[in-house]
Image (cartoon, rainbow, N blue to C red):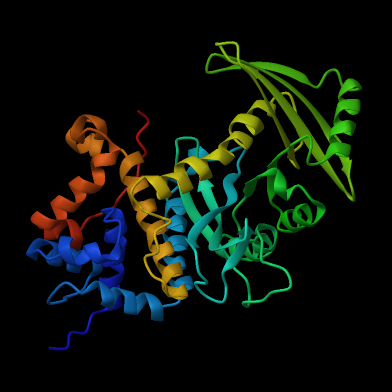
Amino acid sequence: MRVVYEAPFLVMMGILMFLEKLGARRQVKFEFHTAPMLMNINALAGTSAAQIAHPDTLQHLMKKMRYTELAQLLVTLLRSLIRSRALDRFRMLGYRLAAIDATGHLVFHALHCPHCLTQTQGGATTYYHMVLEAKLVTYNGMAFSMATEFIENPDPAPTKQDCEQKAFTRLVPQLKAAFPQMPMCLLLDGLYLGEPVLELIENNRWKYVITFKEGSAPAVWREFEALSELCPDNRATRTRKGARQHFRWVNGIDFGTKKINAIECIEEAADGITTRYAWATNIEVTRENVSTIANEGGRLRWKIENEGFNEQKNGGYNLEHAYSMEPNAAKSYYVLLQLAHMIETLIQKGGLITRVLGRTLRQAIGGVRKLAAYLKESLRNHIIPATLIESPGRIQIRFDSS
């Protein structure tokens, strides 16, 4: 019997595969075949499928559907959160924080596709794929995908391989098109401290806070040191989480045709360990905002690594697993993973569970790591009440402050 499935049904299956952290596509046929699961997927997708689809059917859609169409779902969800003002309190000096960084996605020991990047060491060649991500990050640990650009070679024998900096020039137009009016501050690694990048950022009327490494721009650092001696008033000391932070800053340092502002922070922890941080920015630094730029801006760049890539690689999403060997499908699964990660983050950070159960996730089920297992068993064995799907009423997202 030939069964025709609607795209929303298959997309919902894909999202739930990641949300329940099944780890591989083939697990769908073992975990989804219960009557309540079928009814729940139909209810969530607004469909009426007669049976659960085989994972190969999902694969067929992922191969045919452009991953950019799926990525638009991410933009729509994030725009909804922004319009609802749910994320307003996570802005820094009025700017929403977009951390941008690259990560490894797939690795192979043989040529996977014509677009593989290559690296040869000790006579052995590795074929791999990377992705450049822009994620909206917040101090409470959220990292939502805003735009994605895959780093890949245009053909099997390029004169020069694709790289993170080239991908950045392709990512920026995507980001601007998705959020054209958003006051944004980009959080970047020192790799991006160069005139072309600064020009691109400023042309979009964005701000930036870039990790400033002494070795990456020695001439600028020497000028910072010299000008700092001439600006003795540009000093401030603050206490943060038991640590003493000593700031110094200089505005208007020459950087080619640009002017940049630089901040240094020497942090003395309670245990005696001293750490140095430094950033370049186009935000004018003052005594009043220096701590905010450093602690609520520059230091949040790590959220894309910790709450973003690391969680997706080691927290059950299996980011580095090849859910498909077909190039377009692999990208589509990557986007579904980002959608699932956003949904789980909203569940974890939202206050709904605490308000309904009167307990935190840790108190209710033993911790956030068990959420996927509880969600899977609930959807497999219990039917979502129709009233929650058909007329949920106005939904207000409030983030748990505990």
Whether residue 358 is visible, yes or no, is: no
Q: Position of residue 343 (x, y in %)?
A: 34, 52
> Residue at (37%, 38%) from the top-left corner?
399
> Residue at (55%, 60%) from the top-left corner?
130
The quadrant holding residue 29 is bottom left
Would you say 136 lies left or right of 154 here? Answer: left
Would you say 255 lies left or right of 2 here? Answer: right
Q: Position of residue 76 (x, y in %)?
A: 44, 62
The quadrant holding residue 352 is top left
Q: Position of residue 159 (x, y in %)?
A: 74, 73
Front residue of 266/176: it is 266
369 in relation to 203, above or below? above
The C terminus: image quadrant: top left
> Residue at (65%, 31%) from the top-left corner?
294
200 in relation to 362, above or below? below
> Outermost residue toward the front?
123
> Outermost residue toward the bottom?
1
196 in relation to 219, above or below? below
Would you say 318 lies left or right of 180 here? Answer: left
Number of numbered markers:
0
Whether residue 195 is visible, yes or no, is: yes
Q: Position of residue 286 (x, y in %)?
A: 75, 28
> Residue at (43%, 56%) from the top-left corner?
320
The quadrant holding residue 310 is top left
The N terminus: image quadrant: bottom left
